[in-house]
Image (cartoon, rainbow, N blue to C red):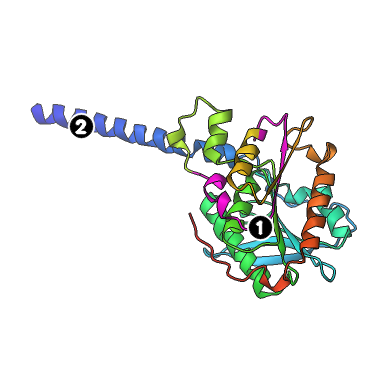
Amino acid sequence: MVFGFVASHGRLILSAVAALGAVLATLSTMPEILLFRERLALSIFELESDVELQPVDLATHDGLMVRSWYHPPRAGKPVIVYFPGRVGDVIRKPRHLFSLAEEGYGLMLAGYRGYGGNPGRPSEHNLYKDATRLLEKVSDNRLAPNGIILYGYSMGTGIASYIAAHSKPVGVVLEAPFTSFRDIVGHNARQMPLWLVRSRFDTRSRYSSIEAPILLLAGERDTVTPASFATLLAAANEHLSQLHIFPEASHDDMFEHGAWEAVSSFLGGLQELAVVPAAAMEGFEPLLD
């Protein structure tokens, strides 16, 4: 009788523990589910464009083949390496990037695993690793003989800042940046316990390590990544940061409210710096954090 009682209750306890573990496992991945849930999984690169793109296939550290898209620069122009936001807007081909390509800039539209027909599932760690390999391929194959400009939008600013802190770009553009993913969760989902947030995308911790001119673009009406995030980042690397806050802009419409002029002026200033092209990717030392 005693043994049966203990065994029965023991099973109940084990079942309760297993159920609690399942709930905690689900909760622990919830911020990441919210981060990646709206990603565009199919490629729609058939959209019309005068700028021709060449596929660049990258073998990842875990055996996947991830495709990015490349447009070569004109002589003397750097290549803009673009890291899109959490929806994967690279396949929507942001119009301002193609306008820059028409002016002679090269483009590398970084593809993400799990996006745009690419295999795999995204995670912060693997996105860093894939981005590192992509930049190594750009360097090894001389795809950017006149240097690179790292450009991140929203979630992509976390990846661009990671690469920027461990390489020597000509310049960095961060559109709708944030200090860390934990700060975004704290701002947008105050009921979510922050100990559940595993992805960090901690731009603030490495921002001061960036040694290139940085352009920060923020919208005063942005409720996703408030302009206060960009202000905090600018203060962390004040001598290299240019901060533009657009009073009428929100998260995804800055180029309707003056961002084009800010980007054009910033890129023109980089050209005047006459950066030595060969130095742009020397000393690339990725440090996965």
Q: Which residue is mark 2?
A: 10
Q: Callout 2: few (<14), some (14-19), or many (20+) C-alpha neighbours within 10 Å?
A: few
Q: Is residue 219 magenta?
A: yes
Residue at image x 73%, y 69%? 144
- Is 287 colored magenta in this rendering? no
Rendered image quadrant of residue 193 = top left
SS for callout 2: helix
State the image coordinates of residue 263 (x, y, percent, origin top left): 80, 49
Residue, far top: 191
| Front position in the image: 59 or 206 | 206
Mark 1: secondary structure:
loop
Under mark 1, the amino acid is: Ala
Q: Residue type at mark 2: give it.
A: Gly
- Of tags 1 and 2, the one toward the viewer is 1
Q: Residue at x 52, y 37 (%)?
A: 182
| Residue located farthest toward the front when viewing the structure as drawn | 239
The residue labelled by disc 1 is: 212
Position in image of residue 132 (x %, y %)? 58, 62
**Which quarter of the rendering shows the N terminus?**
top left
Q: Earlier in the sequence, mark 1 or mark 2?
A: 2
Figure quadrant of residue 180: top right
User: Taking 169 as reference, is 27 left or right?
Assistant: left
C-alpha gap between disc 1 and disc 2: 61 Å
Image-based side of 6 in relation to 14, left or right = left
Q: Magenta span covers which residues? A: 199-227
The quarter of the picture where residue 118 lies is: bottom right
Which residue corresponds to the image point at 55% horizontal and 28% vertical from the top-left? 189
Using a 10 Å C-alpha cutoff, classify the residue at mark 1 as few (fewer than 14 neighbours), some (14 to 19) or many (20 or more).
some
Report if residue 252 is visible in the image. yes
Residue 121 visible in image:
no
* Image position of 55 with respect to 153: above or below: below
